[in-house]
Amino acid sequence: MPVAAPSDPDPNRTWASLSAGKRAVGAPNLGAVRLTPEVGWRTDLAAVQDANRRADTSARVGLLGEALQRGGIRSRVIADRYQERCPAFAVLANQFGWAGGLAVPPAGWSLPDGWIRAALDDCAVVLLSVSSVAEADSRTRPRSPSDLPKPKAAALKEADRLLGLALAALRAHGGRLIVLAPASPDYLDAHCRTLGPVIAYDTRRPESPGLLYSPSTRWPGLVTAADFAPTILHWSEAQARPGADDMDGRVMHVLPAP
């Protein structure tokens, strides 16, 4: 899922592109904003929008949330835990929170099993933000790919459990699931960087394997972060969709393949 050059210093660019449907820039200064349930969810989406105006990207960060709201599509954000130094979550929580709500367990608690099911009963689009894996990864770095530290192994196990809950809940609704890692993984060699993986699953057609494709790349198996927003709008059948000039991304499809 390419978004920029391997040496790109802006780790929030991909998240901004997900919500804008267009290549965008992030706002690193958002990391200084403290967001806690006690004082309210104060998200500084305006800072990211201002950064894109100054960079002249023409990206409207938050466009996906606006389009869902105009189309009457209820949405919600669920996070396994909140990281105040994660501005990407602040942006997505803000834009999705307008039409639905936010759900984050208290510090030290596991995400309750029923939260995902309850959100899907009430909303058509649910964003499940699993940040514990990135948090564990930032604290411990493996000596080799096969040497997985205990904190990260535990975080991956929890992420796997949450995805299982989401898939089980989706089957009852006949929905679709997209799993994506918007940040490329860090490797011991600072000069190496891989693309973030993207997996799509349709509970109504589980027997149809293939490669994700979009006209953005015209290459089977390769899509861009900007393709996320128009795909979600297409799947949710939102009537009020942005025009072609508002989004560079295109709807992802599946090309049959073994």
Image: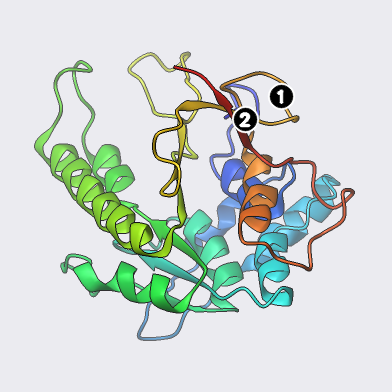
For the C terminus, the image quarter is top left
- Could you tell me which residue is drawn at 69 percent across and 45 percent down? 25
- Could you tell me which residue is drawn at 64 percent across and 32 percent down? 3
The answer to whether 54 appears left or right of 69 in the picture is: right
On residue 23, the disc is none
- Placement of 150 over or under 242, stated as above or below: above
Percent of width and height locating residue 61: 71, 58
The amino acid type, in three-letter code, at marker 2 is Val
The answer to whether 250 appears left or right of 127 in the picture is: right
- Placement of 131 over or under 137, stated as above or below: below
Front residue of 155/223: it is: 223
On residue 223, the disc is 2
Front residue of 147/255: it is: 255
- Could you tell me which residue is drawn at 33 percent across and 43 percent down? 134
Question: Between marks 2 and 1, how big is the CA–CA gap?
Answer: 6 Å
Percent of width and height locating residue 74: 56, 76
Percent of width and height locating residue 198: 48, 34
The amino acid type, in three-letter code, at marker 1 is Thr
On residue 217, the disc is 1
Q: Is residue 59 visible?
A: yes
Quarter of the view holding residue 79 = bottom left
Percent of width and height locating residue 257: 50, 19
Front residue of 136/205: it is: 205
- Placement of 193 over or under 99, stated as above or below: above
Is there CB contact under 8 Å for labels 2 and 1?
yes
Does dot 2 land on a helix, a strand or a loop?
Answer: loop
The answer to whether 53 appears left or right of 124 in the picture is: right
Label 1 crowd (10 A; few <14 / some 14-19 / many >=20): some
Does dot 1 land on a helix, a strand or a loop?
Answer: loop
For the N terminus, the image quarter is top right
Quarter of the view holding residue 108 = bottom left
Q: Earlier in the sequence, mark 2 or mark 1?
A: 1
